[in-house]
Image (cartoon, rainbow, N blue to C red):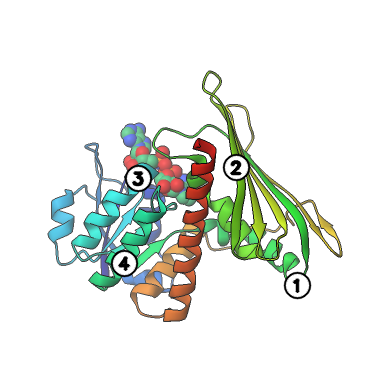
Amino acid sequence: MFGAVVVGIGTAGWVRIRDMLAPLPGSAAEKLNVKGFISRRTLDTQQGVSQISEEEAMSREDIHAAFICTENASHEDYVRSFLQAGKHVCVEYPMTLSYKAAAELWDFAQEKGVILHEEHIELLTEDFKKLKKEVEGKVLQEGTLHFTGGVLKPGFGFQAFSGIARLTWLVELFGELSVTAATMEEDSGTNYSKLTAKLLTSENRPLTWIEERGPDLPRAKNINFHFDSCTLTQIPPAPRAAVGLFMQDLIQFSAKLAGQVSPEELQREKTRILHCLQLAERIQQLCQS
Ligand code: NAD
């Protein structure tokens, strides 16, 4: 069994506790046992789980893993502290708000001999799995992924990082990318922002990623992918999976703890995560230059 602590009781932290209390029967997630939660606030027990201090979580031998579910700006420090204490870490995306910090944390995890896992539930949705199947074997000419959504709370970082899920979709669909241009429109008066990033595939095919946020914008993803054989203008609708997305991620993390994931798969994931963070950083630099 692996004892675990959840850091940050927002939407994600609450779901982590819920899923550990009722893991999917017969799955690797049954190996996780929630021992407490950490919050910067003083809170009552959450779903029957008690608050503990960071110091206690770091020093307790029956706590082997930490779930970092705070706002993005504080991920890096929490991940580093728990790795330093020799604990496995599952961090909600994005791992950090800089590429360099993430690269250092991966090295640190390796040095400490522990698992560092970044949650990417957007890759586990049925919509994405269906889209991936649709795209497979087709030759891209050009494409656009346009995300709209509400305003983010403070502490979620620059849009290329807070929107890493969209960038990750593009990389998983079309392979490694490079950034050719990026711009940011912002209106602080209305809380509106629009990031436009121009990307290229390794076959020099152009992709545009737009991340648009504002108070009245619905949460939606629009695609326009031109292939040599057809055009995809809609994400193929798919019914939700029976197993929740965070539960699927919990099972993946537990499988890593139990040594059930091959080194090749771990390396593939690490390469993808670092590549996406590197792209995000380049986009930020171009927007701010
Ligand atoms: P959230 O705003 O619900 O919580 C973020 C942080 O704010 C937490 O540390 C929480 O303790 C704190 N917080 C929440 N309510 C508070 C209050 N009333 N007073 C003071 N502090 C409060 O954000 P979230 O959706 O849980 O996101 C956390 C992390 O999970 C982020 O890194 C995000 O990118 C990631 N994530 C979330 C989802 C999701 O569906 N919510 C999906 C994927 C990744």
Label 4, secondary structure: give it.
helix
The residue singled out by tag 1 in the image is 137
How far apart, in angstroms, are the residues tagged by discs 4 and 2? 30 Å
Kindly report the distance in space between the C-alpha atoms of the residues bearing marks 3 and 2. Answer: 28 Å
**How busy is the neighbourhood of tag 2: few (under 14 within 10 Å), some, or many (20 plus)?**
many
Which amino acid type corresponds to the residue marked 2 in the rendered image?
Ala
Q: Which mark is residue 107?
A: 4
Q: Earlier in the sequence, mark 3 or mark 2?
A: 3
Q: Give the side of residue 97 with respect to residue 195, left or right.
A: left
| Residue denoted by label 3 | 70
Q: Quadrant where the N terminus lies?
A: bottom left
Q: Residue furthest right?
A: 229
Residue type at the position of mark 4:
Asp
* Quadrant of the image occupied by residue 168: bottom right
Of the two numbered discs 1 and 3 on the same chain, state the one appearing first in sequence.
Answer: 3
Rendered view: 44 above or below 99: above
Name the residue located 25 percent from the left edge and 43 percent from the top edge. Answer: 39
Label 3 and label 4: CA atoms lie apart by: 22 Å
Q: Earlier in the sequence, mark 3 or mark 4?
A: 3
| Of the two numbered discs 4 and 2 in the rendering, the one whose residue sits closer to the viewer | 2
Q: State the SS at label 1.
A: loop
